[in-house]
Amino acid sequence: MSKTEIKKAEPGHASEALKLLSQLGYDSTLEDLKRVLAQTDRRDEIYIAKRSDKVVGLMSVIYFDYFPSQEKICRITAIVVDQNSRGAGVGSQLIDFAKGLSKKRLCSKLEVTTSLARQATQQYYEKIGFTKTSYRYVQEIGN
């Protein structure tokens, strides 16, 4: 496995983030991503994975207190590896990195969300030790 460098994303990574998020089906603009990556009062953390000075992955995590079980949880809210770099271990390295972050923050669980349509992704998560424990329901709130 070649060396992957994982570090916090910065506004200068916005164009790579845009490309990666589009591979997940998200529509963003370069300006919006630059603005979000420049914010210093964020509740989440965004990381990029680089190989040979090329951004090949992206991951965002949030930490929260889960009242019903009185636990602190780390949730991967987005994770994507460039389609040309998949199968090379980058995703596993990002997840291992998130596990390390979780331990540092004294979280009892690491969780990840994915679309119901991403069957292969769900199988991958189960293969590497995640367990499906719930469904997530969403309702749009108009302004």
Image: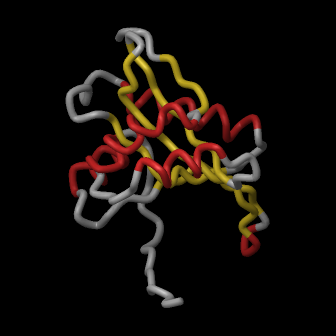
**Left or right, residue 46 beside residue 132:** right
Quadrant in the picture for residue 118: bottom left
Q: Farthest residue toward the front?
A: 31
Quadrant showing the N terminus? top left
User: 70 or 49: which is nearer to us?
Assistant: 49
Quadrant in the picture for residue 65: bottom right
Which residue is painted at 71% across and 37% down in the image? 103
User: 95 or 37: which is nearer to us?
Assistant: 37
Q: Position of residue 111 (x, y in %)?
A: 53, 53
Which residue is painted at 40% across and 25% down in the image? 55
**Left or right, residue 124 beside residue 7:** left
Which residue is painted at 44% across and 55% down in the image? 131
Q: Is residue 141 above or below residue 62?
A: below
How many numbered circles are shown? 0
User: 22 or 44: which is nearer to us?
Assistant: 22
Which residue is painted at 42% across and 44% down in the image? 79
**Left or right, residue 104 beside residue 30:** right
Q: Is residue 114 above or below residue 129?
A: below
Q: Position of residue 59 (x, y in %)?
A: 49, 41
Q: Position of residue 52 (x, y in %)?
A: 38, 10
User: 110 or 61: which is nearer to us?
Assistant: 61
Q: Farthest residue toward the bottom?
A: 142
Q: Position of residue 33 (x, y in %)?
A: 49, 49
